[in-house]
Amino acid sequence: MRKPLVVAALLVTAPFFAACTENAKDSGGDSGDARTVSVTSTEDGCEVSSTEVPSGTLTFDVTNDGSQVTEFYLLGEDGLRIVGEVENVGPQLSRQLVVNAPAGTYTTACKPGMKGDGIRADFTVTKSGDEPSVSADDQQLVDTALTNYSAYVQDQSDQLVAKTQEFIDDYKAGDDDAARTLYPEARTHWERIETVAESFGDLDPKTDAREADLEPGQKWTGWHLIEKDLWPQLAEAGYQPLTDKQRAFYADDLMKNITTLDKRVQNLDYTVDQIANGSRGLLEEVAAGKVTGEEEYWSHTDLWDFQANVDGARVGFEGLEPIVEQKDPELAKTLTTRFAELQKLLDAQKTDTGFTFYDDLTQDQVKDLSNAVNALSEPLSQLTAAVLS
């Protein structure tokens, strides 16, 4: 029996609630392909061209007709499980999500402004008998990719637990110099598997929320709250450093959430499209926060995060590379070249203690990094379609 490409998906616990504008059911998106669905996101709408499609490889063409950056998700029936997502879709821009979806009931969701609940609606995938299947040789490549990626995520999670414990021990003890040194080192392991961590919707906002992105009434905890306390000289005027009791509370809370993440990833299964979409998603994280210098607002350790996201994206691609080389050798060659070009720019910013602080980069250096990210993003967006073809 041929083993299907689809295995259990990642779980999250953040539902999306709101009204959704839909067209009547039709045979598919504008392309005429029953598995291609057009999605139009606005400030208050999420128009989906079809709410019922046959199982197999689905393509969502997402267009943002609003004035805010948006996101699109395909969620499981419970509205909790992320099957696939595209983030950071700018106004008047389009992005594509490719996923392998078996028959079942799902939920579509747009998230204008990338804040708040989101706009969701029911979505059905009917059994078609056309789910992807692979030859024995190809299946061996798939199995190897899945096994290796799972081992990579677990290894990074284990290192994240150990390094975070060192970090919070120093922070709680008041050894701020040591804590400042360990801060970007510990976060490296988080950033390498950030898309996996983000799939657990309850953990990500508790662990990695930036102050500027907090929603009304949201309690701030996690890495960046501690970052601000470690670099108080760069905080706003009048900032009051945390007391020893507060330090212990927030440090222990961070450690609790990191430990929970480690337990959750231990028995996760992955699919090749999840790995490919995760690789793309990590580079989107670079474009959205790291290359802009917004991620590490006080410490300016953005290049540590930048490198870690690129590491994770490259590992995902390299695990799938034998499959891509068979299906689209030119894409495999292009991705290898573009990863190397971006890495060369990052290597130029390495120091004996890590990287150049982001506020010390020149405008030309930031522009070169941004251009290299953009040059890699376009072919990387084709990775999922290539492995599912």
Image (spheres, rainbow, N blue to C red):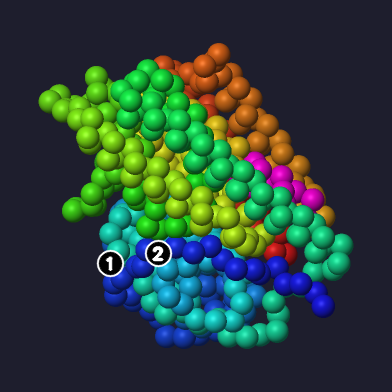
In primary-sequence order, the first of circles 1 and 2 is 2
Quadrant where the image shows the N terminus: bottom right
From this viewpoint, is residue 325 visible?
A: yes
Quadrant where the image shows the C terminus: bottom right
Q: Residue 93: name its quadrant.
A: bottom left
Q: Amino acid at mark 2?
A: Thr
How far apart, in angstroms, are the residues tagged by discs 1 and 2? 23 Å
Looking at the image, which residue is at 44% across and 35% down? 165
* Residue 12 forms part of the magenta stretch: no
Q: Position of residue 125 (x, y in %)?
A: 55, 81
| Left or right: where 332 falls relative to 59 | right
Question: Where is 56 relative to 218, above or below?
Answer: below
Tell me which segment is drawn in magenta: 313-323
For label 2, count other residues whose C-alpha is less than 10 Å away and answer few (under 14), some (14-19) or many (20+): some
Q: Position of residue 117 (x, y in %)?
A: 30, 64
Q: Residue 374: name its quadrant.
A: top right
In what element is the residue under mark 1?
loop
**Label of residue 44 in the image:** 1
Reading the image, the residue beneath label 2 is 13
Question: Where is 1 relative to 139, above or below?
Answer: below
Viewer-proximal residue among 207 and 161: 161
Q: Position of residue 203 (x, y in %)?
A: 39, 53
Looking at the image, which residue is at 50% across and 41% down? 161
Q: Position of residue 18 (x, y in %)?
A: 29, 72
Q: Contact (CB < 8 A) between labels 1 and 2?
A: no
- The number of numbered discs placed on residues in the rendered structure image is 2
| Residue occupying the far top of the picture | 352
